[in-house]
Image: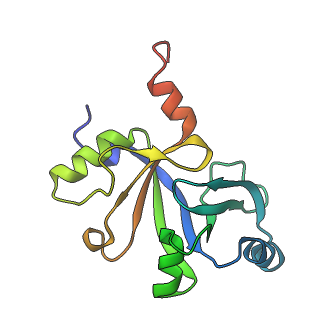
Amino acid sequence: MHSEISSYVTAIDHVGIAVPDLDVAIAFHREHFGLTSVHQEVNEAQGVREAMLRAPGDDGEGTAVQLLAPLTAESPIAKFLERSGPGLQQLAYRVTDVAAVAELLRAKGLRVLYETARRGTSNSLVNFVHPKDAGGVLVELVQPADQVEAAHDPEA
């Protein structure tokens, strides 16, 4: 196992923006910034309807904008909107092994929200660093689905 967290971080995966209405927000970013919605899904476990937006010409390797709208008034995004209003909700780092990074961060005294990673967008694995331990920013750790599959594939 690597001892340095930096050996696991490969990119800034996305920035998450809490919005009250997903369709309105998608239209806004398309009209004003030329972003395209490349993926939408409902994540019942996280209580959100979400969309991943990319700049024209982005082949999927660049940083995305993730729009997050609440499914219910009790969801974490609904509570965020109530407390803070629409806006930047998270910064997500793409990692090669979310479990290993979470373990290393815990060893450094940071609070990681889930004991084990949970399913995120497009079947990725995700975990979060508590904002009080990360300069007031909710930091998401994202292991893309293709890397999850490769980690469990003995021929990879």
Mark count: 0
From the viewer's perspective, is 92 left or right of 107? Answer: right
Residue 92 image point, x, y percent: 47, 59
Residue at the extreme right: 31
Eyeballing the image, is 81 above or below 22? below
- Is residue 128 found left or right of 92 in the rendered image? left
Decide: is 68 above or below 19: above
For the view shown, which residue lies furthest in the top direction? 155
Viewer-closest of 107 and 80: 80
Q: Position of residue 133 (x, y in %)?
A: 25, 69
Residue at horizontal 52 percent and vertical 72 percent from the top: 77
- 129 shown above or below 126: below
16 lies left or right of 55: left
Instruction: Give the quadrant of the N terminus.
Output: top left
Look at the image and name its color scheme: rainbow
In the rendered view, tell whether residue 125 sits above or below residue 77. above
Q: Nearer the viewer, residue 29 or 2?
A: 29
Query: What's the residue at 30%, 69% (across, down)?
Result: 134
The picture places residue 107, in percent across and down from the top left corner, at: 16, 50
Residue at point 71%, 60% (across, down): 54
- Measured as percent of width and height from the top left, residue 145 is found at 56, 37
Residue sitting at x 76%, y 75%: 33
